[in-house]
Image (cartoon, rainbow, N blue to C red):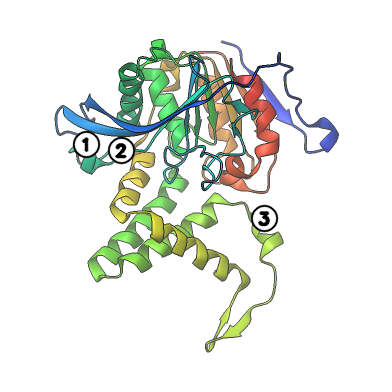
Amino acid sequence: MSAQLAHLPTTASAQPQAVAASPVRPCALTRQRSTRRITLEPKYGGGAQGVEVSYLWCGAPDAPTVVVQGGISAGRDVVAPEGEAAGWWQALVGDGRAIDLNRYRVLSIDWLSPAELGSTAVSSEDQANAISALVDALGIGRIAAFVGSSYGAMVGLAFARRHPWQLDQLVLLAGAHRAHPMATALRSVQRGIVRLGQSSGQLDEALGLARQLAMTTYRGSEEFARRFAGSPELREDRFHFPVEDYLDQAGRRFVERFDAERFLALSESIDLHDVPPEQVPTPTTLIGFPSDRLVPLADLCELQRRLAGLATLEVVESPYGHDGFLKETDRLAPLLRQALP
């Protein structure tokens, strides 16, 4: 079917405008942060397994449900109550925000691991099947939209391929039908660093170093040039470059909150992902960033061309690379409002 390519200019006067919507009276929002036991048969062996899925389901009672999923390090806490640490997409999900909790209930899960599935690996299809089973278990039946970013976009495509009757609309940011081979190469090096740390007894150091390498792929060259162009400083008998402190801090924070085996499994799951776009019939909005080195814009153009359903590609210029879906919240808000039913 025909599709539309829309390129967003960088000038402020040409920013996308939000679609006008009728006023919605605020209501008492509900919040479930819990677990539900479902049965899955993993793609990579192990047979049918009973699995505990940890989820967040919050928003207006009886409102349509929107699934929101992020990257491999993003858990179910897409939004958090006032007074708690902010959710990973708090700027876009909440009362009166782009994904308005007065209009929708947002459902999000913690990603499953091979250990939980009793399998040798975890696939994007396994994650999609878990969300589908959870939708049934919660009595939702059908979701208004699946909004996925990065790995979440891959899982969204797998969901639309396997469970199209449960879904009205796809909104996919910085994720495609398969991993680009160069991105796979970079992630393979990261996994190799972690495995070397496991075998040498330096796991924390290795996981932190792998995260540092990952940060160089998430962000754009333009941002690094602007932030870290200063001169090196002689410290502890060697020169330290401005970017090193940033990378060291990113590595330490990741080690504090993430498990190495989980990182290895979810990183591998990205590279195992492969969904034929011709088998995805759901109307889709794609959002990409030209500075994204992990998901090149050319891959999203190919995905748009091959999808079975009507597909629109929105291009957002950003210095933030792959992390544009986390950083460009002001520019993404009107696109999300327009894309949601």
Q: Earlier in the sequence, mark 2 or mark 3?
A: 2
- Residue type at mark 2? Leu
Q: Foreground: 29 or 85?
A: 29
Q: Residues within 10 Å of mark 2 (few under 14, many from 20)?
A: many
Residue found 45% across the figure and 43% down from its top: 74
**Mark 2 residue element:** loop
- Residue type at mark 3? Glu
- Residue type at mark 1? Leu
Q: Which residue is mark 2?
A: 112
Q: Residues within 10 Å of mark 3 (few under 14, many from 20)?
A: some
Q: Tell me: 238 left or right of 97.
A: left
Q: Tell me: 17 left or right of 160.
A: right
Q: Which residue is mark 3?
A: 223
Extreme right residue here? 13
Cα distance, mark 2 to mark 3? 33 Å
Cα distance, mark 3 to mark 1? 39 Å
Residue found 64% across the figure and 78% down from its top: 232
**Mark 3 residue element:** helix
